Image (cartoon, rainbow, N blue to C red):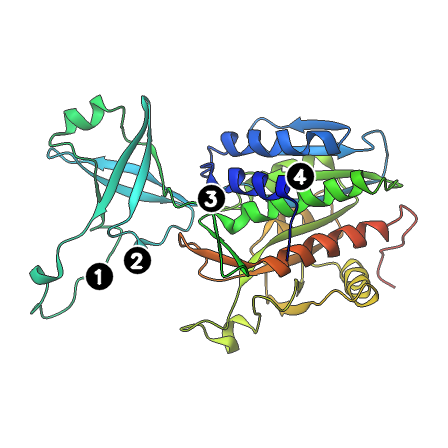
């Protein structure tokens, strides 16, 4: 699957730019610069959610949305010996932390550090193997006192991210930290590019929305839904590839990288809008998969659906391996098919559509 060089250049820059929850502004600048030629207007709210608008004067409003933030860590405690203990910002996994290099975003710039861990030789023979826990993982930035740490510009509340960067694997996958869900921001930006380059005229206002703070509670989507007040929302996020080891398909469903976009069934998903997406996939011969969520999707779809008295909303997800690690993987073919499915669905939406249940 080939993508345009300018698109891949944007994707690499966007993924490599740290955008932890609550500090998404650097990534948002990269994203806004890319979509600017494809939209009529760009706006942002007080907390950093950004959106490009096509046909801003239209009364009928359609949102396509992803979230911009990535999981990270906060400095929580600095010992007298200069070691740093952390708390989560989002769903950061302590199991992958030991021996990882980190970037500590201090007041004087980025400081490198490492998640230290005792050698296996010192743990052999223990009655029970020590496992990484939030209480015992720590960062060593080379300082020997708390004062030295603070002189580096590191204090309680300082943000910490992983520096792992984008690459392609076996010409089949994109790999990077934070594909959850900046790959979504890439996909909706590519939809905007296609609409512009194909000179499509939409009969509604389209709001290409990149929300903040999804990883800690869907807060950015909750805020921006009240600002935009859309008539329809189509959200894209990632979901689990359940074909890798240690995942129970009876619990997590059966989705696989390379088999197409995942169309969700859940209480917050509007039946008629979802059916439009399914019909579009069938008509355009875009492969797709199905997944179900019993109470909530856990994505920004829920925030949009439950806003403003109820907004018809749907979720198109991208299968992803190794979520919330530094080696998240997605199929390039799936990425292309999600872009195409959102694009083709938009061409089938009209303000006159009756989405009410009958």
- Give the CA distance from mark 2 to mark 1: 8 Å
Q: Quadrant of the N terminus?
A: bottom right
Front in this rendered view, residue 109 or 16: 16
Q: Earlier in the sequence, mark 3 or mark 4?
A: 3
Secondary structure of the residue carrying tag 2 is helix
Q: Quadrant of the C terminus?
A: bottom right
Q: Is residue 46 above or below residue 295?
A: above
Q: Residues within 10 Å of mark 4 (few under 14, many from 20)?
A: many
Whether the residues at callouts 3 and 2 have beta carbons within 8 Å, the answer is no
- Give the CA distance from mark 4 to mark 1: 40 Å
Q: Which mark is residue 209?
A: 4
Whether the residues at callouts 2 and 1 have beta carbons within 8 Å, the answer is yes
Question: Is 333 left or right of 155, judged from the image as shown?
Answer: right
Q: Which mark is residue 70?
A: 3
Q: Is residue 95 above or below residue 138?
A: below
Q: Earlier in the sequence, mark 2 or mark 4?
A: 2
Q: Is residue 12 above or below residue 265?
A: above
- Give the CA distance from mark 3 to mark 2: 17 Å
Mark 2 — residue?
95
Coordinates of residue 251 in the picture (x, y in percent): 50, 74
Q: In terms of image quadrants, where is residue 319? A: bottom right
Front in this rendered view, residue 172 or 33: 172
Mark 1 — residue?
131
Residue farthest along the right direction in this orientation = 352
Q: Earlier in the sequence, mark 1 or mark 3?
A: 3
Res 222 seen here: no
């Amino acid at each position: 699957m080939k993508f345009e060089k300018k698109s891949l250049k944007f994707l690499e820059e966007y993924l490599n730019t740290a955008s932890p929850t609550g500090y998404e502004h650097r990534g948002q600048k990269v994203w806004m610069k890319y979509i600017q030629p494809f939209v009529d207007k760009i706006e942002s709210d007080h907390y950093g959610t950004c959106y490009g608008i096509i046909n801003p004067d239209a009364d009928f409003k359609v949102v396509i949305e992803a979230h911009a933030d990535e999981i990270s860590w906060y400095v929580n405690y600095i010992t007298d010996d200069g070691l740093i203990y952390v708390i989560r910002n989002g769903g950061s996994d302590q199991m992958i932390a030991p021996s990882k290099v980190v970037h500590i975003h201090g007041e004087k710039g980025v400081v490198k550090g490492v998640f230290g861990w005792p050698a296996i030789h010192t743990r052999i023979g223990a009655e029970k193997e020590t496992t990484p826990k939030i209480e015992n993982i720590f960062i060593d930035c080379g300082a020997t006192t708390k004062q030295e740490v603070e002189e580096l510009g590191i204090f309680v509340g300082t943000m910490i991210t992983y520096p792992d960067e984008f690459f392609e694997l076996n010409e089949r996958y994109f790999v990077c930290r934070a594909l959850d869900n900046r790959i979504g921001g890439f996909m909706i930006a590519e939809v905007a590019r296609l609409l512009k380059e194909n000179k499509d005229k939409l009969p509604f206002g389209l709001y290409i929305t990149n929300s903040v703070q999804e990883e800690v509670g869907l807060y950015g989507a909750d805020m921006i839904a009240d600002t935009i007040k859309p008539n329809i929302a189509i959200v894209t996020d990632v979901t689990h590839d359940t074909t890798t080891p240690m995942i129970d398909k009876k619990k997590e469903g059966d989705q696989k990288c390379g088999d197409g976009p995942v169309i969700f069934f859940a209480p917050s998903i509007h039946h008629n809008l979802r059916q439009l997406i399914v019909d579009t996939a069938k008509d355009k011969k875009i492969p797709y998969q199905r997944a179900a969520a019993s109470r909530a999707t856990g994505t920004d779809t829920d925030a949009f659906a439950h806003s403003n008295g109820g907004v018809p909303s749907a979720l198109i997800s991208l299968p992803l391996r190794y979520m919330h690690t530094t080696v998240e993987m997605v199929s390039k073919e799936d990425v292309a098919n999600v872009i195409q499915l959102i694009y083709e669905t938009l061409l089938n939406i009209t303000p006159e559509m009756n989405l009410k249940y009958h």
